[in-house]
Image (cartoon, rainbow, N blue to C red):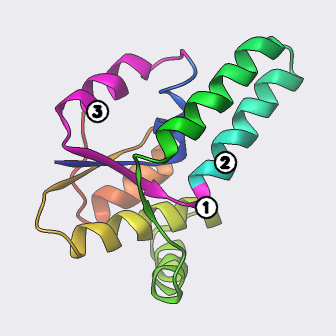
Amino acid sequence: MILYLDTSALVKLYVREVGSVRVRNWLKRATGAATSVVAYAEARAAFARLHRGGHTNPRRHRERVAQLNIDWESIMRVELTASVLRLAGETAETYELRGFDSIHLASALWLRNRTEIPCAFAVFDQRLRDGAVRAGLALLP
């Protein structure tokens, strides 16, 4: 199974919060991980927000960024092609999603439609989760 991680799931690999253990366990069972290229910028923004807010010290912030940079090389990345962006626009309208959420849903759908390996969607944002269910993506509990 390929585990598609939206940013809310990806960040849980680096920040200890509710759901972090679940994401790590899902990843152990997967044959690979995938995400949209936008997840990198979103994850870095989340790390920076934690750092600016005083929830992370400078050393831990640098460690998170360094580990993300290492892991990024082994994560399958869905590029923002014209077809993915068009699908993102459609999913935004159909499922009432915000921009980056629609990109994640479109990226997961694009990946599912182009591989014979089963794909599962890891997501913690409820609106995006609801859209993924309506779009027919397999979700992990």
The C terminus: image quadrant? top left
Measured Cα–Cα span from mark 3 to mark 1: 22 Å
The nearer-to-camera label among 1 and 2 is: 2
Give me the disc on residue 3. none
Q: Secondary structure at mark 3?
A: helix
Q: Residue at x 20, y 39 (%)?
A: 30
Residue 46 x %, y %:
71, 36
Measured Cα–Cα span from mark 2 to mark 3: 20 Å
The nearer-to-camera label among 3 and 1 is: 3
Residue ID for mark 2: 42
Vertical placement of residue 42 versus 46, above or below? below
Question: Is residue 141 in view from this perspective?
Answer: yes
Q: Secondary structure at mark 1?
A: helix
- Disc 3 and disc 1 in contact, CB within 8 angstroms: no
Residue 112 x %, y %:
24, 67
- Disc 1 and disc 2 in contact, CB within 8 angstroms: yes
Residue ID for mark 3: 27
Kindly identify the amino acid type of the residue bearing the numbered disc 1: Phe
Residue ID for mark 1: 100
Label 2 Cα neighbours within 10 Å, binned few <14 / some 14-19 / many ≥20: some
Measured Cα–Cα span from mark 1 to mark 2: 9 Å
Q: Does the stretch in magenta take in 19?
A: yes
Q: Residue at x 35, y 58 (%)?
A: 132
Kindly identify the amino acid type of the residue bearing the numbered disc 3: Leu
Horizontal relation, residue 10 to residue 33: left or right: right
